[in-house]
Amino acid sequence: MIYFCSQCGKPVRQRVPAGDNRLRHVCDACGHIHYENPRLVLGAIVEWQGRVLLCRRAIEPRAGCWTLPAGFMENGESTQAAAARETLEEACAHVEHSRLFALIDVPQIDQVHVFYRGALAGGKHAPGEESLETALFVEEQIPWSQLAFRTVRLALEHYFADRRAGVFGQHQLILEALC
């Protein structure tokens, strides 16, 4: 919720601006329209000798659960650079030869999760500040019941299905809300 204008500091109110069709926060003093847009979460499926790198979260949400290295994209970086940065920050790992793998819309929380698939440089990894531990898993060892997010589960399910098929595609999904 926005209460004050970031341009002039005056109070804002919600209304549909001229030429628009959505309720927005608008400043009546200076006319600035405050758009709220989805946030991008970038991550990577990092492979090493048939195993996948996972991080056990040290932070909320879902502290203690396992996830792919991922986090919010910063201004001024590409999606590929964001996935590589998050892998470095969360798993002290460098990802090489990454390619776009999955795009998952999560409209109920105003997010888009994008996952790249790439190789773990030199097999080296360690927990970063936001991780309790990191580990490499074969499919049968993935802690499926302890995964932090549905998008991570979906990305991993598609990854292992593609790997079994011998061909990696690009996947686009819309994550529907749970009832």
Image (tube, rainbow, N blue to C red):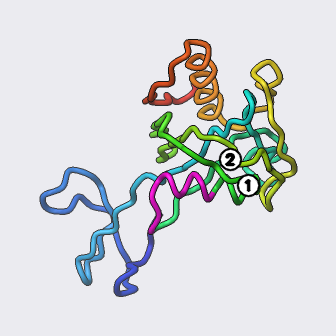
Q: Looking at the picture, how far across and down is residue 118, in whole percent?
A: 59, 40
**Label total for image:** 2
Q: Mark 1 near mark 2, Cβ–Cβ under 8 Å?
A: yes
Q: Looking at the picture, how far across and down is residue 174, in whole percent?
A: 45, 30
Q: Amino acid at mark 1?
A: Glu
Q: Which residues are magenta?
A: 76-85
- Determine the image quadrant of residue 76: bottom left
Residue of label 2: 69
Residue of label 1: 90
* Rendered position, 88 above or below 122: below
- Determine the image quadrant of residue 89: bottom right
Number of the label disc, if any, that sits on residue 148: none
- As helix, strand or loop, the secondary structure at mark 1 comes to helix
The residue that appears at 69% across and 44% down in the rendered structure is 120
* Earlier sequence position, callout 1 versus callout 2: 2
Q: Amino acid at mark 2?
A: Pro
Q: Residues within 10 Å of mark 2 (few under 14, many from 20)?
A: many
The residue that appears at 57% across and 22% down in the rendered structure is 158
